[in-house]
Amino acid sequence: MHYEKADNMIPSDETLRLGKLRYYEILSTPAESAFDQIAQLAAEIFDVPNAGIAFQTDGEIFMKAQVGSSIGLPIKSEAFTFFTSTPISSPEGYHIGLIYVADTKFKTAEEQQLKMLKHLAGMVMEKLESRIAARKAFRAYDDRLHVLIHDLKNPMTTISLQSELLGRIPGIDDKAALIAGKINAQSKRMIDNLNDILSVARKEAHSFKPQKAKVDLKEVLGEVKFNMDLTLKQKKQTLLIDIEAPVEIFGDADKLKVVFSQLLDNAIKFSPKGKEIKISHQTAENEVTIAIKDNGVGLTEEDLDKIFLKFATLTALATDHENTYGLGLITANALVDIHKGKLWVESEGKDLGTTFYVTLPIK
């Protein structure tokens, strides 16, 4: 798999498109049989020797799957007597790549074949979406586990020191000294094990510990809204952020963007076209609560009981048949948890809308 210069497939909003492409973590990755199988299906549908899947960066094309001979890069359809392709588009409508078929022999593409090629492009997108959803959920859970491990070190260190002091008390009997020594040895062993786990976590690309700094939640929400503007327009929905002044806390801006992106994505998917989504806030003592309220399909009492369970089956269905993987809310919940916050949901029932609340400590 490789890159070479390309001059085609340049969209109007390049920055957002490239951001979406990198979001899927597909570039410079090893070949995968699932993509090869999709390309092979395309070749068989059109009865041609050449097919492939390509993703475009800023002026370059990354070949992810290739059946038959190389078509050359940049892709030049004029090199073939027969060449047809369909874009691979993200749910927001950004064209991040294409799936193509080609042959040196003349032939005509039938309408049914072209429809099937579009379905294959959808399969590629489905694979990318489901894979990134799973990765984000696993990372969030790993982050939460590592924060808990980090927090465990403090009491274990205290136990180790106290047991060591206990064993040094003048006049302590031999049995008590023996027990104190065992407690000290076991606690030190546990501390070493915890440090080993944390050492591995620190070497990974994604830091387990929130990189806390002063963050304006109003700005975070504004950026999330901007990134999802195309999705909102597709469903003719409006998003009102009813926050006038800055709302500053100490938190990890990147992780908080993931949280609010997941919650807003959920509100969009489960709201009919033309509805309004409203974001508001309340501040009390040392915490702030952000509320994301939609006018969508709502949740039953049964749904409310299991909405934060992995792969839970809910009665609520996406209003435009969007894909849902049952991992977005799991990810958001885990990331809120490592901020020492709380995520919960309220709904008055089916078709009566839903409100998600995120409470975060200010410091």
Image: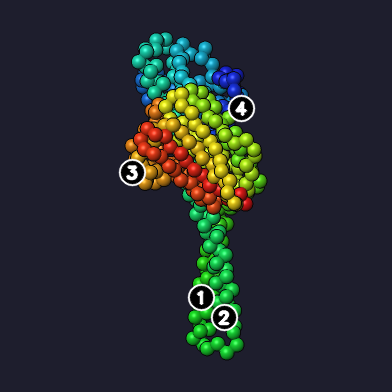
Between the C-alphas of marks 1 and 3, the distance is 46 Å
Of circles 2 and 4, which is in front? 2
- Graded by Cα atoms within 10 Å as few (under 14), some (14 to 19) or many (20 or more), the crowding at tag 2 reads some
- Give the residue number, with chain letter if any, for mark 2: 166
Mark 2 or 1: the one toward you: 2
Q: Residue at x 60, y 24 (%)?
A: 14
Q: Provide the secondary structure element on which disc 3 rests.
A: helix
- Location of residue 8 with respect to 150 vertically, above or below: above
Label placed on residue 39: none
Residue kind at label 2, given as amino acid type: Leu
The three-letter amino acid code for the residue at tag 4 is Thr
Q: Which of disc 3 and disc 4 is earlier in sequence? A: 4
Picture coordinates of residue 80 (x, y %)?
Answer: 48, 13
- 2 or 4: tag closer to the N-terminus: 4
Q: Are marks 2 and 4 in contact (CB under 8 Å)?
A: no
Q: Which mark is residue 183?
A: 1
Closer to the camera: disc 4 or disc 3?
3
Residue 268 rendering spot, x and y as whole percentages: 46, 31
Residue visible at 55% across and 59% down?
150
Q: How far across and down, in percent of the image, does residue 224 sit?
A: 56, 34
Indicate which label's residue lies in the foreground, 1 or 3: 3
Distance from Cα at disc 2 to Cα at disc 4? 62 Å
Q: Are marks 2 and 1 in contact (CB under 8 Å)?
A: yes
Alpha-carbon neighbours of circle 3 within 10 Å: few (<14), some, or many (≥20)?
Answer: few
> Could you tell me if the residues under marks 1 and 4 are in contact, i.e. CB atoms within 8 Å?
no
The x, y position of residue 317, in whole percent, is 36, 33
Q: Mark 1 vs mark 3: which is more N-terminal?
A: 1
What separation in Å lies between label 2 and label 3 (alpha carbons)? 53 Å
